[in-house]
Amino acid sequence: MVIHYRLARPSDAAAIADLHADSWRRAYRGFLSDSFLDHEVAADRAAVWRQRFHEPDPGLVTMTVVGEAHGEVHGFAHSVAADDPQWGTLLDNLHVRHDVRRLGIGTRLMAETARWLEDHGYDEGLYLWVVERNQTARHLYDAVGGRPVGSGVWDAPGGASVASLRYWWPRPSDLARRLPAGIATLGS
Ligand SMILES: CC(C)(COP(=O)(O)OP(=O)(O)OC[C@H]1O[C@@H](n2cnc3c(N)ncnc32)[C@H](O)[C@@H]1OP(=O)(O)O)[C@@H](O)C(=O)NCCC(=O)NCCS
């Protein structure tokens, strides 16, 4: 299967929201409330993505990269550039469709994000928050050189308070070097 990586566009909002909701239902069971995951997550994620694409905050620079095959979104990463003066850009969401995991898509989405940041002058750090008990994601972040640098609590939608860890990459360009040689810059 060949995955094509590109910047997301407004017409992707619904597909990304569906993948995001499905991923939370599968990965966050036990972390977020059952009632939220069973009844509210689809509408919650749809509203988030509608706002990101159709009423974006003019004070934020954001970027979303999708991995696509056969016209379907197989994964995405969403970031807020230079979000924090100490830690840099926030990688806010990273999700790969459940049936295509362990194929390198998550790594590639992170590397494409990092190269975009480097190309646009945001090489001052990349960080994210991961649920402490989310071992799958932590394996990935450890594998691509992330450093756990602190802990916090995520006040999650649906009312849960979830113990989380901050992972940090001092220079996004180090992550970007994980791209295979000769790969073209992200198209739109
Ligand atoms: C976390 C996630 C994005 C990883 O995506 P992916 O495409 O499967 O990751 P990759 O194939 O690039 O994995 C790269 C490396 O990460 C590690 N890794 C990834 N998944 C792993 C798992 N389930 N168990 C152990 N190691 C794992 C491995 O080192 C892997 O390399 P390898 O396959 O050569 O051993 C995906 O599992 C996902 O969407 N999970 C649900 C949502 C989520 O938790 N997102 C993160 C929120 S902070």
Image (cartoon, helix red, strand yellow):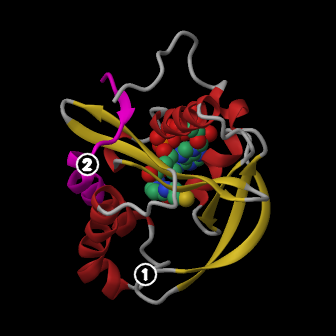
Q: Does 63 sit left or right of 141 as displayed? A: left
Q: Which residue is mark 1?
A: 157
Q: Position of residue 29 (x, y in %)?
A: 42, 74
Q: Nearer the viewer, residue 58 or 80?
A: 58
Q: Is residue 83 above or below residue 29?
A: above
Which of the two discs, 2 and 1, sits closer to the camera?
A: 2
Identify the disc placed on residue 10: 2
Q: Is residue 4 magenta?
A: yes
Q: Position of residue 144 (x, y in %)?
A: 68, 38
Q: Residues within 10 Å of mark 2 (few under 14, many from 20)?
A: few
Q: Nearer the viewer, residue 135 or 76?
A: 76
* Marker count (numbered): 2
Q: Is residue 186 above or below residue 26?
A: above
Q: N-terminal of the two: label 2 or label 1?
A: 2
Q: Amino acid at mark 1?
A: Pro
Q: Amino acid at mark 2?
A: Pro
Question: Residue at horizontal 58%, vertical 23%?
Answer: 179
| Magenta stretch, residue numbers | 1-19
Q: Secondary structure at mark 2?
A: helix
Q: Is mark 1 within 8 Å of ligand 1?
A: no
